[in-house]
Each structure stands twice: as structure tokens, then as C-alpha cells.
Image (cartoon, helix red, strand yellow):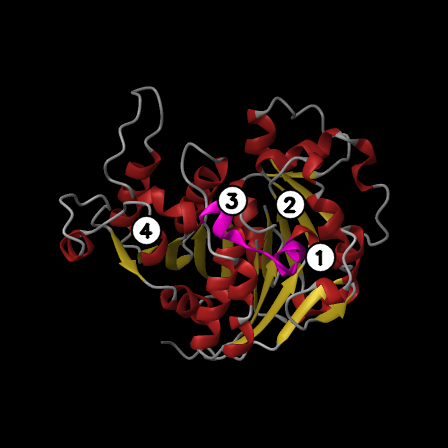
């Protein structure tokens, strides 16, 4: 380790729907690892990423693990700054009550602000 | 400036693997430091030593291996992405009692902690997927 | 904290729309890979409120026969300049 600060603010922007591709899982794994290593983590669901939060998922029917359940681990790992883009939600006919976990509703300017405040951004 | 590079894309499936290679080579040529190269998700295929490529095509895996070896780069293949895609070093090959080693010796198989360490210790992290 | 955004997918994926909605004055966008096709659409940048510098990777433009179709007057940069831009801006956000 050099003299760089050991605590960074890392923002994860999860933008892909679950199951079709693996990006949602990769994004979650990176965030959980960051929390284990005691980094400051922001987690944002944007565009199709909000579809990961939909209730009543059952991925057993496609031989996969249900991502909705995995997202509940965010809180267990101490990741409490979890946001959802309002516009992405409404464009997909979703309400906050349709979602599996409690999340903060934010607009685009708030997401922009998170990006600006971060040392590093993972966007997938 | 101290960079780390994260590659999510497999060679031949996506141009991003080649873009990552060109970018990495360029930054090294310019005298910048590469703290770590991290292959993640499908990106682990960039470290596959068992690929055979047509003679008139670029063998990107081999080029990565040469670049990593020449510059003594710290190259990490994410363990959870690697083993489920059949990318094994001697240790993993023995652990799971399989009879092949498919990862170039120039890359090390390790966990996501190495990525977080790279974030902490780099000036810039650039992602290619 | 200025930000360089890389966009590597064709305009049909609409990544620039989302990207432009979170960036602010002083940020920049660089088109790479299939993202360079934005240069072939004059209307690409018209609708965004925030002004940002736009670059495009010349190697990817050349590969796709698009060097003469830079209708949005993006500043063409090579890999050396791409690396330099990553140093110039405080961080890099990749859209793919």
C-alpha cells in the first residue's frame, strides 16, 4: 500500500436487467467486495437496472439464482446508500411499492452529483 | 500517472477486449504506471492460454501474455469468474481434480479484493466492456 | 471533479441520452468502438442542455469508414490522446 487514502468513495451504477446478461451480478459482487474492504459505497439502479428490483422474481424456472434475493444482502453488508432513478422506474410502469427493497428515489441531477463526489465509478 | 484497467469483455466476442489492450499498451509506451490489470466476467478469457487463432488473425490472448511478461505487469484473473468458465491455474486445477491448466502463468488467479485494492491505490481506473 | 465519459455502443442503445442527463459543464464524452457512429448523426447532440466537449477515437472511425462522416465536428483523437484525456479529467466513467 502506498500513502493513498485507504477509504475511497465508490459508486456502482447497475444499468442492466437481470438474467439476460450477467452484468447485474458482477456489479453486485463488486459492491459487496468493496463493502467488505470498508469502502464508502453508493449503489444506483438506472435504466433497465431498476428491473432487478421487481418483486415476485423466481429464477429457478430458468436455472438461475434470483437476483432480487441477492440484492437484500446490500443492507447486510452495510450498503445503505441505495438509490433508484425515478425516471427509469416510471418509464417501466413501476412504482416504489413494486420493489423488493427499500431504496431512495432520486433524479438524474442527484445521480450526477454522486458521480462527481466519487473517487471511482463502476457503470454496468 | 498510476492506472488500473478492468476488462469485462472476451476477445473475438467484443471489440472492447482489443480496445483495452491498445489502451494499456499505449499508456505503458507513454511511461505511465499500470498498478493492476483485472480480468472480470467474460474478460477472464483474455488470459486463456489454450486458444488457437487463424494465422491471419491477431492472437489477443498471446499479445496480453507478452505485454504482461515484458512489462512485468500485475495481472489478476477474478477467481469466481475464472473457474466457472474453465480458466484454471495449477493450484485450481489440482483443487478441483481437473487435468488442464488453461490460464497463462503471467496472470494470477485471485479474488475481488485485488480489484478494490487497485481502486484504492490507482489514480485512474478505466473499464472496458 | 471533472469526468470523461466513454461511450462504446451505437446510438441505437441510447447511452448518450442517459450519460448526458448525469453530466455537467466541464465533463467530456469520448466515442469509441460502435459509439463513433454518433458522429454520423448531426442531430446526436442537438437536444442536450448541458454543453460538453466531444471526442471520437480516430482508429475506430477509420476502421468503420467514418472518417469523412464526422458530422458533429467531434475532436478526433488517437490512442495517445485518449490516454492523455484520461489523465486530464479527474475520473473516467465507461458506458457500455
The residue at which mark 3 appears reads as C80
Q: Earlier in the sequence, mark 3 or mark 2?
A: 2
Label 3: element kind: helix
Asked if the residue under mark 3 is in contact with the one under mark 1, i.e. CB atoms within 8 Å, the reply is no
The residue at which mark 1 appears reads as C27
Given residues C81 and C36, the one toward you in this image is C36
Label annotation for residue C30? 2
- Label 3, residues with CA under 10 Å away: few <14, some 14-19, many ≥20: some
Q: Which residues are magenta?
A: A49-63
Q: Residue at x 70, y 64 (%)?
A: A84
| Residue C78 versus residue B91 in the image, above or below | above
Chain ID at mark 4: B
Kindly report the distance in space between the C-alpha atoms of the residues bearing marks 3 and 2: 13 Å
Label annotation for residue B82? 4
- Label 4, residues with CA under 10 Å away: few <14, some 14-19, many ≥20: many
Chain ID at mark 1: C
Kindly report the distance in space between the C-alpha atoms of the residues bearing marks 4 and 2: 31 Å
| Residue B32 versus residue C48 in the image, above or below | below
Label 2: element kind: strand
For residue B15, side relative to residue C10 (left or right): left
Q: Residue at x 76, y 47 (%)?
A: C17
Label 1: element kind: loop
For residue B2, side relative to residue B49 (left or right): right
Q: Using the rendered view, name the quadrant where residue B31 is placed.
A: bottom left
Count of numbered tags = 4
Asked if the residue under mark 4 is in contact with the one under mark 1, i.e. CB atoms within 8 Å, the reply is no
Chain ID at mark 3: C
Given residues B125 and B40, the one toward you in this image is B40
Amino acid at each position: 500500500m502506498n500513502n493513498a487514502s485507504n477509504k475511497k468513495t465508490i459508486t456502482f451504477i447497475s444499468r442492466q436487467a437481470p438474467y439476460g446478461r450477467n452484468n447485474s451480478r458482477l456489479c453486485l459482487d463488486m459492491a459487496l467486495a468493496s463493502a467488505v474492504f470498508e469502502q464508502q459505497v453508493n449503489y444506483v439502479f438506472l435504466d433497465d437496472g431498476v428491473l432487478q428490483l421487481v418483486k415476485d422474481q423466481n429464477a429457478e424456472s430458468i436455472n438461475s439464482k434470483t437476483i432480487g434475493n441477492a440484492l437484500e444482502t446490500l443492507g447486510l453488508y452495510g450498503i445503505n446508500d441505495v438509490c433508484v432513478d425515478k425516471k427509469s422506474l416510471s418509464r417501466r410502469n413501476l412504482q416504489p411499492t413494486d420493489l423488493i427493497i427499500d431504496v431512495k428515489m432520486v433524479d438524474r441531477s442527484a445521480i450526477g452529483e454522486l458521480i462527481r463526489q466519487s473517487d471511482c465509478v463502476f457503470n454496468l | 500517472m498510476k492506472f488500473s484497467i478492468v476488462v469485462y469483455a472476451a476477445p473475438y466476442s467484443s471489440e472492447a477486449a482489443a480496445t483495452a489492450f491498445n489502451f494499456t499498451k499505449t499508456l505503458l509506451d507513454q511511461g505511465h504506471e499500470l498498478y493492476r490489470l483485472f480480468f472480470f466476467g467474460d474478460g477472464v478469457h483474455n488470459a486463456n492460454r489454450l486458444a488457437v487463432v487463424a494465422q491471419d488473425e491477431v492472437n489477443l490472448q498471446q499479445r496480453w501474455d507478452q505485454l504482461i511478461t515484458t512489462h512485468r505487469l500485475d495481472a489478476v484473473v477474478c477467481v469466481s469468474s475464472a473457474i466457472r468458465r474453465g480458466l484454471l491455474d495449477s493450484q485450481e486445477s489440482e483443487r478441483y481434480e481437473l487435468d488442464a491448466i488453461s490460464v497463462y502463468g503471467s496472470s494470477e488467479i485471485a479474488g475481488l479484493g485485488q480489484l478494490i485494492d487497485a481502486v484504492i491505490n490507482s489514480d485512474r481506473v478505466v473499464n472496458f466492456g | 471533479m471533472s469526468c470523461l465519459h466513454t461511450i462504446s455502443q451505437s446510438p441505437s442503445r441510447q447511452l448518450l441520452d442517459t450519460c448526458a442527463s448525469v453530466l455537467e459543464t466541464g465533463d467530456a464524452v469520448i466515442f469509441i468502438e460502435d459509439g463513433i457512429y454518433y458522429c454520423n448523426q448531426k442531430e446526436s447532440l442537438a437536444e442536450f442542455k448541458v454543453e460538453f466537449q466531444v471526442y471520437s477515437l480516430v482508429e475506430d472511425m477509420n476502421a468503420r469508414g467514418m472518417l469523412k462522416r464526422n458530422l458533429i465536428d467531434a475532436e478526433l483523437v488517437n490512442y495517445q490522446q485518449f490516454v492523455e484525456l484520461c489523465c486530464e479529467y479527474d475520473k473516467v466513467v465507461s458506458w457500455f
